[in-house]
Image (cartoon, rainbow, N blue to C red):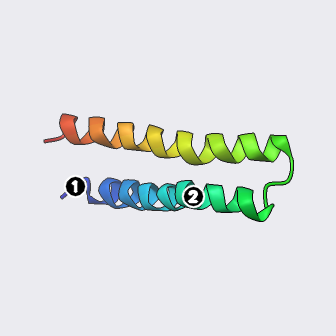
Amino acid sequence: MKNLFTHITSILALILLGAGCVMYPFWLMNGTLDNWYLIIAVFIASYGGFIGNLIWYIIFIKNNK
């Protein structure tokens, strides 16, 4: 119960980053991402953030059983 805030914020971050990962192809198709710097930056932020947060959360769960 003492780590409830950490669980809530981690799950919320995973949900928001997951939404960014799902929306990324649509942003490309609609032309929202109009230059290469923006395309690469949003890709790294979305997918890298999601994968990094997922790995961190799995390790956190294993260490705090």
> 32 above or below 34?
below
> 55 above or below 14?
above
- Tell which of 21 and 49 is nearer to you: 21
Q: Could you tell me how many numbered marks the image carries?
A: 2
State the residue lying farthest toward the front. Answer: 29
Q: Disc 2 marks which amino acid?
A: Gly
Q: List x then y, in percent, for residue 45.
A: 62, 44
At 81% from the left edge and 61% from the top edge, which residue is drawn?
31
Asked whether, in this view, residue 18 is left or right of residue 38, the answer is left
- Tell which of 14 and 2 is nearer to you: 14
State the residue lying farthest toward the right. Answer: 35
Asked whether, in this view, residue 55 is left or right of residue 40, the answer is left
Q: Disc 1 marks which amino acid?
A: Lys
Quarter of the picture containing the C terminus is: top left
Dot 1 falls on a residue whose secondary structure is loop
Quarter of the picture containing the N terminus is: bottom left
At 63% from the left edge and 40% from the top edge, which residue is drawn?
44
Q: Which mark's residue is nearer the viewer, 1 or 2?
A: 2
Dot 2 falls on a residue whose secondary structure is helix
At 37% from the left edge and 38% from the top edge, which residue is drawn?
56
3D distance between C-alphas at marks 1 and 2: 29 Å
Among numbered discs 1 and 2, the one appearing first in the sequence: 1
For disc 2, the marked residue is 20
For disc 1, the marked residue is 2
